[in-house]
């Protein structure tokens, strides 16, 4: 057999020559000289909405000579949260990751501070949503950048025709598609008491409202908004359990009456249950982002033509709507942090947000009120102005269930749906009010564990 | 069978130590046991990487605090023991696993007997058809069941309404929801019992039945005194295996009810997912998932000891 004449000496000589050549060569700026950036993004349910984000990222990548790679990860079965948890545990993965609701708090220890980016945005666009601040500003440091993509509020989406026919209420007149025409005397009439009386009429007419009372986020959010409107506090900022209050009793007594005029299956609904209820034409109203309307536009145009998104009812403590923002976080183990921050700043500019909102037909909601003047919400139809009041207008304030508890505690309360389980125990399970409150106190005590 | 391949004497081996070492090495790798070990290495690596490591890691995680920064020993377990919802989950998991395994075994045993008594020509067709639930990916078939039980547009309710009955709150009433998830588990798992019991029935010597028939034993006596004793080991093993898998079930409950209404259908896996992944308390989630480990391990030891004992008696 012929022996190779490649000796150790030859290998070392070649290696040395190669190293010198590489070091001495002039720096050549390649197509992606500034490296590579990987993103794990929430997979948008609106067809085509992902393309807008991809296009924005590619524009930025070309301009900055960075190769951008995006993986769209579905939230079906919490796959996005599983991916984030796996990456956080492994200490490797994408550079930028989407985080829904409480996930910034969950992964705060492995998320890069993003004060530079968010403070720059606040400087440009004014005050940011207090819910976004509550969820992503941990101990004074921003760990996530609020994004319009997938961020939502859950106001009322009601059938104009059914409300007019069976309750005599003209919702379009009460909440016209121009905030300057809001009449305070009319909007002030839209209270939880009026909501109940109209719900009773609609129930009798065979078109009940559909308010989920399961353990998914749509249920937790509208109950959270109602609790806030009644002044219910579950746990305060200083870890005091305050669920045993007159406000809680009043809210639960109210809910007993309201749930009696809902379809009985609401206790099993997931986040799609209320959408299907409205689209089927059986329901007079739900509390949801415009996704139900958008699907009705495709599947049941007659329903879509009569949908009107408008603010939530007002309670003794004000008018609140549940908000669920999404964020982008940069892992502390990312290899291209400065590029990641630059990209996040770019896609958060109003011009970029405009494209994202357009692509999602108004579903995506920025966290800056100064961006609520985008044309999309005025122009999408049918009917024209149907989602104008999707961004909170008038005296409507954004809120999230479980606030003002510390976000570590809030995440437990929210995800374990302690508020809706309480309501279901009282309204469906027939348990005594005192027993329900005692149960909630015990559960809330568990969330305070360090 | 010999374990060592015979080798011839070599005078050079005695003279040169290095050569002897080489030959010793060759002798070792020529051993059948060595070859078997080497061939098993990939499987052992997979088990170590995908079973042993995650198991040890989850035990480690369960000993940490919520932020995973401090060792707290059994703190997570003692915390769980003080929670009402956790005890409800323990109770529900037990109801879920025990009732589902009981009915799966019963249905499997009955259908195995029915098929075994069919003419051999028709058996294959029935075996194939009855195995279908087990072959379809569980997540997919559960989604199909979810549509049948859909809270608002249930196909079952449509039929019941058509027959003049009143609708059943399959998933919105907690007790019906428990029934529904158990039913789907039985539907999915019964074919496994069927195929195992059918194989066991085929291995019972025909002469035993013939002798019993001559002695005048009726069908029930033949079943009790011949079939059951001959199937005891396979019944024990299938029940154990199914019990472990059913206790760890996740897909059915997660897809159909998500643990609701009122947390009344949560089982260990869905509750661990809720606490660990959704609420971000991974150590507590790991503790929930490990909670049944000692109980299942102890029952496995007892059942397998019985199987071994009976095996020796038969052998």
Image: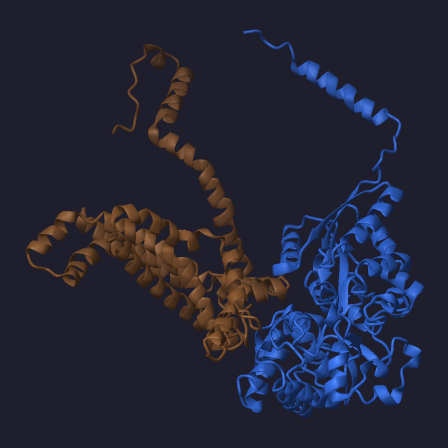
Specify the color scheme: by chain
Question: In the image, B297: left or right of A303?
Answer: left
**Residue A320 lies in what quarter of the image?**
bottom right
Q: Which chain is blue?
A: A
- From where the camera sits, is residue B263 visible? yes
Q: Position of residue A169 (x, y in %)?
A: 78, 86
> Residue most toward the top?
A2
* Foreground of the two, A317 or B300: A317
Q: Which chain is brown?
A: B
Image position of B66 with respect to A39: above or below: below
- From where the camera sits, is residue B83 visible? no
Question: In the image, A225: left or right of A350?
Answer: left
> Residue most toward the left?
B215
Q: Going 16% across and 48% down the picture, which residue do you hit?
A: B206
Q: Position of residue B279 (x, y in %)?
A: 63, 67
Image position of B6 with respect to B294: above or below: above
Question: In the image, A251: left or right of A434?
Answer: right
Image position of A448 with respect to A22: above or below: below
Quarter containing the N terminus of chain A: top right
Question: In the image, A58: left or right of B88?
Answer: right
Quarter containing the C terminus of chain A: bottom right
* Foreground of the two, B311 or A426: A426
Could you tell me how many numbered marks the image carries? 0
Q: Going 74% across and 71% down the picture, which residue do you hit?
A: A302
Q: Going 24% across and 51% down the picture, which residue do you hit?
A: B201
**Residue B285 lies in what quarter of the image?**
bottom right
Q: Position of residue B210 (x, y in %)?
A: 11, 51
Q: Position of residue B103 (x, y in %)?
A: 35, 65
């Amino acid at each position: 057999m012929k022996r190779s004449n490649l000796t150790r000496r030859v290998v070392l000589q070649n290696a040395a020559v190669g190293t010198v050549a590489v070091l001495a060569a002039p720096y050549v700026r390649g197509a992606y000289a500034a490296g590579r950036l990987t993103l794990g993004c929430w997979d948008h349910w609106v067809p085509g909405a992902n393309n807008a984000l991809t296009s924005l990222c590619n524009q930025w990548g070309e301009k900055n000579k960075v190769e951008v790679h995006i993986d769209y990860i579905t939230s079906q079965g919490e796959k996005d949260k599983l991916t984030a948890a796996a990456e956080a545990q492994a200490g490797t993965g994408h550079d930028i990751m989407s985080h829904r609701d409480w996930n910034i708090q969950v992964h705060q220890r492995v998320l890069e501070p993003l004060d530079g980016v968010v403070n720059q945005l606040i400087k440009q666009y004014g005050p940011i949503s207090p819910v976004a601040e509550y969820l992503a500003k941990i101990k004074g440091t921003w760990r996530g950048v609020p994004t319009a993509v997938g961020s939502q509020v859950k106001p009322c989406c009601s059938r104009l025709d059914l409300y007019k026919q069976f309750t005599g209420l003209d919702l379009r007149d009460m909440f016209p598609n121009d905030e300057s025409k809001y009449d305070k005397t009319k909007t002030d009439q839209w209270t939880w008491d009026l909501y109940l009386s109209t719900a009773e009429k609609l129930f009798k007419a065979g078109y009940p409202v559909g308010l989920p009372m399961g353990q998914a986020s749509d249920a937790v959010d509208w109950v959270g908004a109602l609790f806030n409107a009644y002044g219910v506090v579950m746990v305060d900022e200083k870890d005091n359990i305050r669920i045993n209050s007159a406000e809680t009793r009043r809210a639960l007594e109210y809910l007993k009456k309201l749930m009696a005029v809902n379809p009985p299956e609401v206790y099993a609904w997931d986040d799609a249950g209320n959408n299907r209820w409205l689209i089927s034409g059986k329901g007079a109203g739900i509390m949801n982002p415009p996704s139900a309307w958008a699907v009705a536009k495709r599947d049941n145009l007659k329903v879509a033509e009569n949908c009107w998104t408008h603010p939530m009812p007002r309670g003794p403590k004000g008018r609140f709507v549940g908000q669920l923002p999404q964020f982008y976080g940069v892992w502390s183990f990312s290899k291209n942090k400065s590029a990641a921050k630059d990209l996040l700043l770019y896609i958060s500019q109003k011009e970029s947000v405009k494209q994202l909102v357009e692509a999602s037909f108004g579903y995506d909601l920025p966290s800056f009120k100064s961006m609520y003047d985008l044309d999309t919400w005025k122009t999408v139809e049918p009917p024209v102005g149907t989602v104008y009041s999707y961004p909170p207008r008038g005296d409507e304030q954004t809120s999230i269930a479980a606030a003002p508890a510390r976000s570590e505690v809030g995440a437990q309360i929210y995800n374990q749906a302690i508020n809706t389980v309480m309501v279901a125990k009282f309204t469906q399970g027939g348990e005594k009010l005192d027993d329900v409150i005692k149960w909630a106190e015990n559960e809330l005590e568990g969330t305070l564990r360090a | 069978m010999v374990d060592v391949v015979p080798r011839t004497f070599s005078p050079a081996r005695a003279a040169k130590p290095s050569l002897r070492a080489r030959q010793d090495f060759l002798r070792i790798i020529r051993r059948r046991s060595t070859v078997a070990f080497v061939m098993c290495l990939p499987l052992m690596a997979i088990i170590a990487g995908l079973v042993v490591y995650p198991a040890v890691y989850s035990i480690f995680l369960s000993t940490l605090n919520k932020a995973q920064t401090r060792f707290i020993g059994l703190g997570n377990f003692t915390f769980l023991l003080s929670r009402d919802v956790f005890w409800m989950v323990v109770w529900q998991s037990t109801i879920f696993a025990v009732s589902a395994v009981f009915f799966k075994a019963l249905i499997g045993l009955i259908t195995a007997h029915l098929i075994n008594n069919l003419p051999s020509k028709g058996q294959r067709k029935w075996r194939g058809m009855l195995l279908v639930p087990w072959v379809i990916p569980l997540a997919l078939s559960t989604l199909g069941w979810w549509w049948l039980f859909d809270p608002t547009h249930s196909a079952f309710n449509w039929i019941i309404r058509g027959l003049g009955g009143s609708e059943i709150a399959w998933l919105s009433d907690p007790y019906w929801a428990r029934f529904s998830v158990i039913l789907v588990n039985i539907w999915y798992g019964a074919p496994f019992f069927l195929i195992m019991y059918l194989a066991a029935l085929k291995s019972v010597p025909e002469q035993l039945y013939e002798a019993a028939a001559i002695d005048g034993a009726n069908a029930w006596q033949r079943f009790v005194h011949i079939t059951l004793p001959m199937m005891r080991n396979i019944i024990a093993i299938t029940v154990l295996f199914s019990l472990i898998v059913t206790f760890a079930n996740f897909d059915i409950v997660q897809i159909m009810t998500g643990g609701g209404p009122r947390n009344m259908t949560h089982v260990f896996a869905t509750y661990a997912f809720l606490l660990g992944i959704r609420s971000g308390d991974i150590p507590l989630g790991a503790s929930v998932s490990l909670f049944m480990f000692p109980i299942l391990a102890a029952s496995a030891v007892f059942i397998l000891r019985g199987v071994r004992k009976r095996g020796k008696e038969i052998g």
